[in-house]
């Protein structure tokens, strides 16, 4: 079963995404803080990372850049999300594979995750 890490500081968004992915057959690890999730991802890398871009303390852009610089996580498929469509350009420049705008629609979310699981490179 593919494992997906979901990181978002909004508990409602985190819950919604987690439930949708679990119903679709994914093993989901959800965190409200990127700084807490990073060591766990290094220990047991997921198949896909979904991260919000705008979070306090340790934002999604920093997380993406950290993953790309880490030998263990450098090839990890990353799906970034934000309510600001303008951040899509910056997310892709930082190394995100894909971007979805909030509020999320579950259909496109599941399609994006499935694509990234099946096409990790």
Image (cartoon, rainbow, N blue to C red):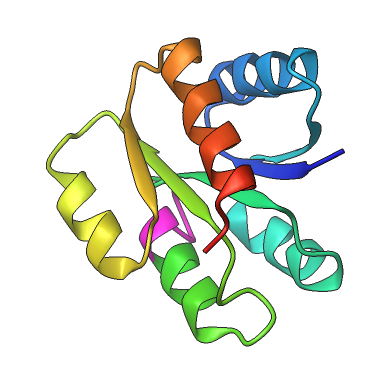
Residue drawn at point x = 38 percent, y = 58 percent: 96
**Of helix, strand and loop, which mostly describes the magenta segment?**
loop
Residue positioned 63% across, 62% down in the render: 35
The question of residue 103 being in magenta is answered with no
Q: Quadrant of the N terminus?
A: top right
Front-most of residues 1 and 42: 1
Residue 32 place in picture, x, y as percent: 64, 40
Q: Which quadrant would residue 65 be assigned to in this image?
A: bottom left
Q: Could you say which quadrant of the image residue 22 lies in?
A: top right
Which residue is pictured at 45% across the width and 65% down the height? 64
The vertical placement of 40 against 98, above or below, is below
What is the x, y in percent for residue 110? 55, 23
Q: In this orientation, which residue lies closer to the viewer: 61 or 45?
A: 45
**Number of dots carrying numbers:** 0
Image coords of residue 55 (percent x, y): 43, 46
Q: Is residue 17 above or below residue 29?
A: above
Q: In the displayed image of the protein, which residue is found farthest to the left?
A: 86
Q: Is residue 92 above or below residue 42?
A: above
Residue 47 is left or right of residue 2, and the answer is: left
Q: Which residues are magenta?
A: 56-61
Residue 12 horizontal side relative to residue 54, left or right: right
Residue at 59% x, 84% y: name it. Answer: 70
Residue 51: horizontal and vertical position, in percent?
A: 50, 45
Query: 48 and 19: which one is in front?
Result: 48
């Amino acid at each position: 079963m593919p494992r997906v890490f979901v990181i978002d500081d909004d508990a409602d968004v985190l819950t919604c995404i987690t439930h949708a992915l679990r119903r679709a057959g994914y093993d989901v690890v959800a965190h409200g803080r990127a700084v807490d999730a990073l060591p766990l991802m290094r220990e047991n890398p997921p198949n896909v990372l979904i991260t919000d871009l705008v979070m306090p303390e340790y934002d999604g852009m920093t997380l993406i850049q950290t993953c790309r610089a880490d030998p263990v996580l450098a090839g990890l498929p990353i799906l970034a999300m934000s309510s600001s469509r303008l951040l899509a350009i910056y997310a892709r420049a930082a190394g995100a594979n894909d971007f979805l705008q909030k509020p999320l629609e579950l259909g496109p979310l599941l399609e994006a995750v499935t694509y990234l699981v099946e096409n990790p490179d």
